[in-house]
Amino acid sequence: MENTGVTVIEHLLLHQKQSPMATGQFTRLLTELIFAAKIISREVNKAGLVDILGLTGDINVQGEQVRKLDDFANRVLIYRMQQAGILCAMASEENADIIEVPDNRPRGDYLLVFDPLDGSSNIDVNVNIGTIFSIMKKTSDRNYVTLEDFLQGGSSQIAAGYFIYGPSTIMVYTTGQGVDGFTLDPSVGEFLLSHPSIKMPEQGKVYSVNESYSCYWDEKVKATVDYFKSPENDRGKPYTARYIGSLVADFHRNLFYGGIFMYPADKKDPAKPHGKLRLLCEAAPLAFIAEQAGGAATDGKGRIMDIKPTALHQRVPLFIGSKKDVEKATHIMSGV
Ligand code: AHG
Ligand code: MN
Ligand code: MN
């Protein structure tokens, strides 16, 4: 039987009744976000056929080369979300500063932070990539937004999620009432509920880290990774190594199969003393999802969700995945 079931918006409306926080504005926000993701998905599917692969020639605020699809996804999200009338401002991995809603457009109370295309180094070789998003509410009653409004801890997120563009396009999101997954049925253009109430296995079999940087790690990180490779660990055999280089794809696999993804601080690398991943647009939204699915996320010292950001593009070490595996990593890194 084909999945003729519940669309993501129907699902949201059902849940909206139960959540005092959810409003018609929030439904509108998600509807617009989904529409933008469908456009990105369509373009990703055409990669190779149209001139959308390769670099733009620009370097972004992260010091990274911008690819044409990064730029396309960023522009689609900014344009659609500025038109929608439910945001007061946005922040993107690709933009140095916050992005305001133009004066001639209506504004709402929500803030959106996103990584328009995650895993961009995989774009040109047809490997999974994604869009990660985090939704917060403006806390001040000013009618304008400043950087301060965005520097909220992960626990303040109203919703978070991602779209993964792979063999199928899947949306996974949480509003703090568990995690659900929806698969895009391209024939009707709707995301249909395909993975209700996702629960991450308590302990996994996979460790996921870019081990070529071990020369930059401190002893505690080395001991942590060694633990997962050791036949004498709690499993009694080494974990399997899997590293795609798209955070969203590595996270998605571990969400279902269990395991731990690590991007530690490369302490001895002057370029990445705090790791590579961005707190606001990568670590915090995925931490919200991980916790809601029964998993955990830490920077090696404490919950990612408890970190109060001090900068828009702040980077953090990230250890995320199955609860027991993340606890084990934290335990080893705390030197106990
Ligand atoms: P982005 O494509 O948004 O810049 O993110 C890339 C990130 C993340 O997706 C991935 O886990 C990590 O970079 C890979 O980095 P390394 O190549 O250093 O392992
Ligand atoms: Mn990214
Ligand atoms: Mn990106």
Image: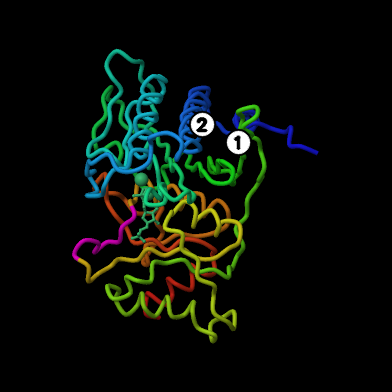
The span from disc 1 to disc 2 (Cα, nearest Å) is: 8 Å
Q: Position of residue 50 (x, y in %)?
A: 42, 33
Relative placement, left or right, of 77 versus 276 is right
301, 7: nearer the viewer: 7
Crowd tier of the residue under label 2, counting other residues whose Cα lies within 10 Å: few below 14, some 14–19, many 20 or above: many
Q: Which residue lies furthest to the right in this view?
A: 1
Crowd tier of the residue under label 1, counting other residues whose Cα lies within 10 Å: few below 14, some 14–19, many 20 or above: many
Residue 149 at least partly seen: yes
271, 145: nearer the viewer: 271
Magenta residues: mostly which secondary structure? loop
Which dot marks residue 184?
1
Relative placement, left or right, of 222 versus 203 is left
**Does the CB distance between marks 1 and 2 fall below 8 Å?**
yes
104, 75: nearer the viewer: 75
Point out the stretch of residues depicted in magenta.
270-277
Q: Position of residue 238 (x, y in %)?
A: 54, 79
The residue lying at 59 percent from left, 68 percent from top is: 203
Is-magenta flag for residue 231? no
Is-magenta flag for residue 274? yes
Q: In this view, does 187 lie above or below 296?
A: above
* Residue type indicated by callout 1: Leu
